[in-house]
């Protein structure tokens, strides 16, 4: 049923051309939609390793087939031959030349269509591009809690975690050129981005207290500089006796990991001294980070000191800050919760940096408290706190530099602090920052749950992408446009009757007549219009025979029977044996 209808439509007037045009146009549209949807994207992974170029190749064949129908000899016949006889009036306006030109144009287009393939294969080019990987993980060290120690040594004492001891040493003596290189980072491609994240860390602060220095020696020397102690901060007096260039004192501060005072002689004038006081303390740092060319680049967004909290057993540093809500890609709701359902919540005293240290070992405190989600609570355990303090104090208490015959004598920590043989606020501040950064790297790497606590990011890969070279599309586009122009001209120039009469496929008679015996041609005085060919074919009987050169040709049958008019056109030739 459908087949017949299609066949009828096919035979109908411009059926073939319309289908050809439709095929060419649809294939072209399909090509464009495919390349447009993949332009700038990675090459698609289709089943059976089909490539985008293979698909374009298929559509190019279809375009060629469509254009082929549009430009087929068929049209040529109908336009210039079949239609010609019955519609000579047409050529009163459109002379022979015009028809010839249309035909030539079609022939020319047909040749151009044949070479469309190389152009099609040029359409898809490749370009370097970057893409996010779903498979590769990107991580950077961070943690909500630092609880690591080297084990208990007494009811309230712990040995320092060895890597932390190394970190303290490294920070004091020889920090690496690029401290973020110490942070655990996974980024296989060397190009990763991370969302904003926070971590427990160590922060520092420094202040210049030079005005507090007194000189108890002579006004013209020898000088005897003294920095008055502070009992409430457990600092004794700090002296800088003659031929001493640097002296320090560190107190076992109750609220800080380190509290240090630095007194140094002005090495330019030897007549004055400067003094600084610095602290190291637990804090929560918030970072923006990325890995570029394999190097972790971090920007510190904020540093928030942690307060002392009495609820965690023996006490601990805790921060439950409601504005630290960004955890990588996740945004946390860190507001305090109602106390009726405490699953997953932690009870903490509200932050108070200056909380009295004596309460540390006390049990119930009357400090105001609230419940927070675990991820929003930052903990610096009391055990590592108690283990770190004496370790770091040991290096920075009484670290002095004395001169003996232009030789400077002192510990390596003191020498590193007194580098360039002078000290100013910037160098002290940088020194303490370096120590805190190295310690922070260690804390971030020793998260209780390993990489599960780390900040996850996105890995960017260098890959190749489809780059559509649209210019190469202009050739098939122009061909289709020309094909349509040709179709239009043909449509306008062909009278309705001629179009209606045409069959979808012209007879092959014209081609067969090429190898016809001269005798027949002479007899019929053929001028090679289709009507005449048809007439001759109806009455001619030929046989296939060898010509003089041994080639096959149709020659007039000796037993010509002209009378058999009832034979159909298709039976016009009787092929006998060679
Ligand atoms: C890293 O990835 C970004 C895209 O996320 C890209 O713009 C940049 O060029 C890449 N850098 C390198 C060095 O590959
Ligand atoms: C330096 O001064 C302090 C008092 O400020 C004094 O106790 C000390 O003996 C003096 N040292 C010297 C070497 O003069
Ligand atoms: C002594 O230390 C306490 C606590 O650290 C501080 O508040 C006070 O200002 C200090 N006194 C001087 C004179 O620096
Ligand atoms: C450093 O200061 C302490 C007291 O704070 C003092 O006992 C010691 O002698 C000083 N050292 C030097 C080399 O001045
Ligand atoms: C969070 O709030 C504290 C004060 O409560 C402020 O000092 C800090 O800068 C804030 N941090 C951010 C990241 O907004
Ligand atoms: C807890 O109390 C709040 C009101 O304070 C209420 O909205 C909530 O439903 C309660 N949750 C449970 C689990 O009882
Ligand atoms: C040392 O003294 C000189 C002259 O008074 C001064 O310019 C310089 O800033 C001082 N250096 C330090 C580190 O205070
Ligand atoms: C701090 O560390 C950097 C390397 O990260 C180093 O270049 C700089 O000299 C150090 N500063 C001090 C004062 O130690």
Image (cartoon, rainbow, N blue to C red):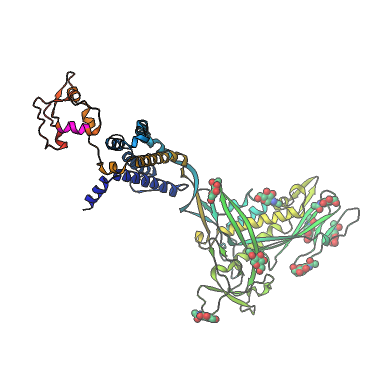
Q: Main secondary structure of the magenta part?
A: helix
Image: 362 above or below 273: below
Nearer-the-camera pick, 391 or 496: 496
User: Which segment is the magenta one?
Assistant: 532-538
- Left or right: 289 in relation to 130: right
The answer to whether residue 546 is seen in the rendering is yes
| Nearest to the observer: residue 351 or residue 32 | 32
x and y, in percent, of residue 22 in the image? 34, 46
Picture quadrant where residue 154 is located: bottom right
Residue 156, placed above or below residue 436: below
Q: Residue sitting at 9 percent across and 24 percent down?
A: 558
Residue 73 position in % (x across, y down): 29, 35
In magenta segment, residue 416: no
Q: Say whether residue 453 is left or right of residue 157.
A: left
| Left or right for 344, reference 401 | left
The location of residue 370, given as percent across then percent down, is: 59, 76
Quarter placement of the C terminus: top left
Question: From the viewer's perspective, is residue 116 above or below residue 379?
Answer: above
Q: Which quadrant holds residue 397?
A: bottom right
């Amino acid at each position: 049923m459908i087949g017949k209808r299609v066949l009828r439509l096919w035979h109908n007037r411009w059926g073939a051309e319309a289908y050809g045009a439709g095929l060419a146009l649809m294939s072209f549209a399909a090509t464009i939609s495919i390349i447009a949807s993949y332009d700038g994207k990675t090459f698609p992974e289709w089943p059976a390793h089909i490539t985008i170029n293979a698909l374009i190749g298929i559509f190019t064949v279809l375009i060629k087939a469509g254009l082929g129908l549009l430009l087929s000899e068929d049209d040529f016949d109908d336009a210039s031959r079949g239609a010609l006889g019955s519609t000579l009036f047409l050529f009163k306006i459109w002379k022979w030349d015009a028809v010839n030109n249309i035909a030539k144009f079609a022939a020319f287009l047909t040749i151009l269509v044949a070479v469309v393939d190389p152009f099609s294969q040029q359409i898809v080019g490749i370009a370097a591009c970057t893409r996010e990987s779903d498979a590769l993980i990107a991580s950077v060290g961070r943690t909500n809690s630092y609880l690591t120690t080297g084990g208990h040594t007494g009811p309230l004492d712990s040995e320092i975690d060895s890597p932390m001891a190394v970190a303290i040493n490294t920070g004091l003596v020889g920090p690496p050129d690029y401290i973020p290189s110490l942070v655990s980072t996974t980024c296989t491609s060397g190009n990763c981005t991370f969302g904003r994240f926070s971590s427990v860390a160590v922060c520092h602060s420094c202040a210049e207290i030079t005005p507090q220095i007194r000189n108890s020696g002579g006004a013209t020397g020898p000088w005897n500089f003294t920095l008055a102690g502070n009992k409430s901060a457990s600092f004794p007096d700090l002296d800088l006796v003659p031929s001493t260039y640097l002296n320090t004192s560190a107190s076992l501060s109750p609220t800080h990991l380190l509290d240090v005072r630095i007194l140094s002689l002005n090495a330019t004038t030897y007549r004055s001294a400067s003094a600084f006081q610095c602290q190291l303390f637990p804090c929560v740092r918030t970072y923006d980070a990325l890995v570029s060319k394999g190097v972790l680049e971090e920007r510190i967004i904020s540093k928030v000191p942690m307060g002392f909290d009495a609820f965690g057993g023996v006490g601990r540093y805790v921060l439950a800050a409601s504005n630290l809500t960004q955890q990588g890609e996740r945004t946390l709701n860190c507001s305090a919760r109602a106390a009726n359902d405490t699953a997953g919540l932690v009870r903490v005293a509200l932050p108070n940096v200056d909380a009295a240290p004596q309460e540390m070992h006390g049990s119930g405190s009357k400090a105001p408290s609230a419940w927070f989600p675990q991820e929003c609570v930052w903990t610096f355990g009391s055990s590592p706190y108690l283990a770190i303090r004496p370790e770091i104090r040991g290096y920075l208490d009484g670290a002095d530099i004395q001169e003996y015959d232009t030789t400077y004598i002192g510990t390596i920590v003191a020498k590193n602090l007194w580098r360039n043989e002078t000290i100013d606020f910037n160098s002290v501040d940088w020194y303490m920052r370096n120590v805190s950064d190295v310690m922070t790297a260690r804390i971030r790497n020793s998260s209780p749950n390993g990489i599960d606590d780390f900040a996850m990011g996105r890995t960017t890969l260098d890959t190749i992408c489809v780059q559509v070279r649209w210019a190469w599309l202009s050739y098939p586009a122009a061909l289709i446009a020309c094909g349509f122009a040709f179709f239009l001209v043909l449509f306008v120039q062909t009278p309705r009757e001629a179009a209606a009469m045409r069959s979808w496929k012209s007879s092959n008679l014209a081609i067969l007549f090429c190898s016809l015996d001269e005798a027949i041609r002479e007899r019929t005085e053929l001028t090679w219009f289709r009507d005449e060919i048809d007439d001759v074919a109806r009455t001619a009987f030929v046989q296939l025979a060898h010509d003089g050169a041994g080639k096959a040709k149709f020659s007039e049958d000796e037993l010509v029977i002209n009378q058999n008019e009832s034979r159909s056109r298709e039976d016009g030739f009787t092929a006998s044996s060679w």
